[in-house]
Every structure is written in C-alpha cells, then in structure tokens.
Amino acid sequence: MTQHIISLSRREVLRYGGATLALLAVGPMFSTTAEASPKEAKAKLAQLTGDVDIIKGRIHITLPRLSHDGTRVRIMIKTDSPMTPDDYVRAIHILGERNTVPEIASFQFTPQSGKAEIITRIRLAKSQTIIAAAEMSDGSVYMAKARCNIARGAGGCG
C-alpha cells in the first residue's frame, strides 16, 4: 500500500483558502428559499378537508394589513357557529400561500368548546395571503382570506 503525500506551498494554501472563503461568502446570494405557492396551499387545504366544495362565509380573519415583524404576526379567527351538538366547528385550519410550507396550524373543536375562536401569533416568511378554513360538523367547509404585507427584510421564516 503506497501513501500519497500532497505538498502545497504557502501561496497555494492561501490561494485555495481565499477561493473557499469567497465561495462561502457569495454562495448564499445565489441560494433561494423554498416557498409554497397558492397552488400548493390549495392542494394542502383539499388534503386537510377531504376535497369538498368550499363555501365563503361563516369564518372571519382579523390580520394587520402591514407588519414590521414577520416573526410574530397577530391573527384572530372567529366563526359564526352556535357550537351546539347539531351545528359546530370541528376544525379550523390556517394556511399561508408563501411560507416555506403552506400549513401554519390546525385547531380542533367540540360543542363543549363553547366557541370556535382563535387568537394567536403566526410566522410569515413574506407578504402573502392567509387562508382560514372551518370544517363544520355536517362536513361542509367555509373559508376566508386576508392579506398581510411584511415590511421589506422583516420576514420571519428565514
């Protein structure tokens, strides 16, 4: 078994080291962050809800039109439901059309929940439309959309 010894001069080490540092510095400029698309968000919503016809109404989103901090955007979702054993919200799904993945959160409810309402903070990668969908006890799905603009450079997902 023979061994190969690589001999580099000081100049060659500095040259290769400098080239490596230059690639490390410039590389991130050419990389792109993966993000969902409206089409992917629609497909994810169909997967979550069983691909039923979606109706507008009975769910409302309160979201700021402009946020200077995409890492914590306040969102409030309310539904028009009596929350009785015959008519209640089973689940609320929140999706973002331009986050790294479309599904942001899902919440489960029962008639004992009293009301189907969510107040939380979400992380948004960039300006985008947020979708909220309410799955009802009868299998119907209601949807609402709202847009939030994230100040330039203030995205929260990378």
Image (tube, rainbow, N blue to C red):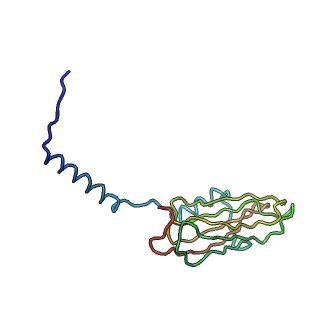
Residue farthest to the bottom? 65
Above/below status of 52 relative to 78 = above
In the figure, is residue 32 to the left or right of 53?
left
Point 44% across, 71% down: residue: 153
Above/below status of 28 relative to 143 = above
Residue farthest to the right? 85
Q: Position of residue 139 (x, y in %)?
A: 75, 60
Q: Position of residue 38 (x, y in %)?
A: 53, 66
Q: Position of residue 125 (x, y in %)?
A: 50, 65
- Pick the front one: 109 or 51: 109
Q: Position of residue 127 (x, y in %)?
A: 51, 72
Residue farthest to the front? 10
Point 26% across, 54% down: residue: 21
Above/below status of 148 relative to 123 = below
Q: Quadrant of residue 52?
A: bottom right
Q: How many numbered dots are placed on residues in this image?
A: 0
- Pick the front one: 88 or 126: 126
Residue farthest to the top? 1
- Pick the front one: 119 or 115: 119
Q: Quadrant of residue 85?
A: bottom right
Q: Quadrant of residue 10?
A: top left
In the figure, is residue 125 to the left or right of 86?
left
Looking at the rendered image, the quarter that the N terminus falls into is top left
In the figure, is residue 5 to the left or right of 55?
left
Point 74% across, 67% down: residue: 117
